[in-house]
Amino acid sequence: AQRVTQPEKLLSVFKGAPVELKCNYSYSGSPELFWYVQYSRQRLQLLLRHISRESIKGFTADLNKGETSFHLKKPFAQEEDSAMYYCALKPGTSYGKLTFGQGTILTVHP
Amino acid sequence: GAGVSQSPSNKVTEKGKDVELRCDPISGHTALYWYRQSLGQGLEFLIYFQGNSAPDKSGLPSDRFSAERTGGSVSTLTIQRTQQEDSAVYLCASSFRDFNEKLFFGSGTQLSVL
């Protein structure tokens, strides 16, 4: 069975500082990894997925199969980045049954 | 439509009562999912629908939980004889197809069992 671990429940940084939200996974096959974000009083929404290799709102994430990690990074955090972030895994050829991590609450202070 | 719609947004019930939660997916989305978001448990998968059939019910926590989908559209999640541990936010999501498609989430139903 797959598992997703986000070791930090809370993460605080100051505006303009770099931020990294950690995500580690365990899965025997080839997974697809995602980051979902939930801003205050908004719906859970997709931030980015590893197969797209894109940067969204300045965030990037690289899948490291050797370390089984998919950390989310942004070089200069903004106050509007404050939100709950979930890392999620989907078996590569499966339907949208996601295994989520516990989530990390990011607070960016002015 | 405007997105995935869930009702009610909040539901307070007494232990032992039955509740029904409704999800109206985005028009044309064939895949529909129910997840549960609870403190200390994060987000847990409950059930997956493709059209009106549910090929994966593996996340339903007990036989008190059931779900159906009619007309390939609206889905209802029913919890019988509610318990306090059922208190959570129940999220519905839909996608256009089932493989490699982005999930669109509803705003959820906050269920409180007293």
Image (spheres, rainbow, N blue to C red):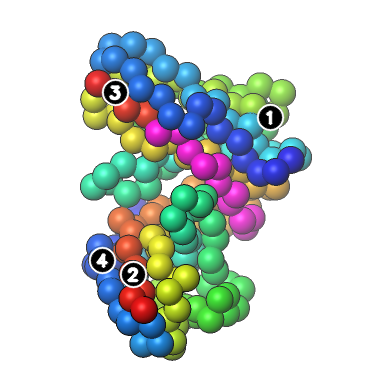
> Distance from label 1 to label 4 (Cα)?
38 Å
Q: Is residue B22 visible?
A: yes
Location of mark 2 (residue):
A107
Q: Circles 4 and 2: CB distance less than 8 Å?
A: yes
| Residue B57 screen position, x and y as percent | 46, 32
| Residue A93 screen position, x and y as percent | 56, 57
Q: Residue at x 38, y 60 (%)?
A: A84
Label 3 or label 1, whichever lies nearer to me, is 3
Q: Are marks 1 and 4 on the same chain?
A: no
Location of mark 4 (residue):
A10
Q: Residue at x 61, y 73 (%)?
A: A52
Location of mark 3 (residue):
B113
Q: Which mark is residue B73?
A: 1
Q: Are marks 3 and 4 on the same chain?
A: no
Mark 2 surroundings within 10 Å by alpha-carbon count, few (fewer than 14), some (14 through 19), many (20 or more): many
Q: Circles 3 and 1: CB distance less than 8 Å?
A: no
Which residue type does callout 1 highlight?
Ser
> Distance from label 2 to label 1 (Cα)?
38 Å
Which residue type does callout 2 highlight?
Thr
First in residue order: circle 4 vs circle 2: 4
What range of the chain is rendered magenta? B100-110
In the displayed structure, B112 sits above or below A33; it is above
Quadrant for residue A12, please give it: bottom left
Q: Is residue B105 magenta?
A: yes
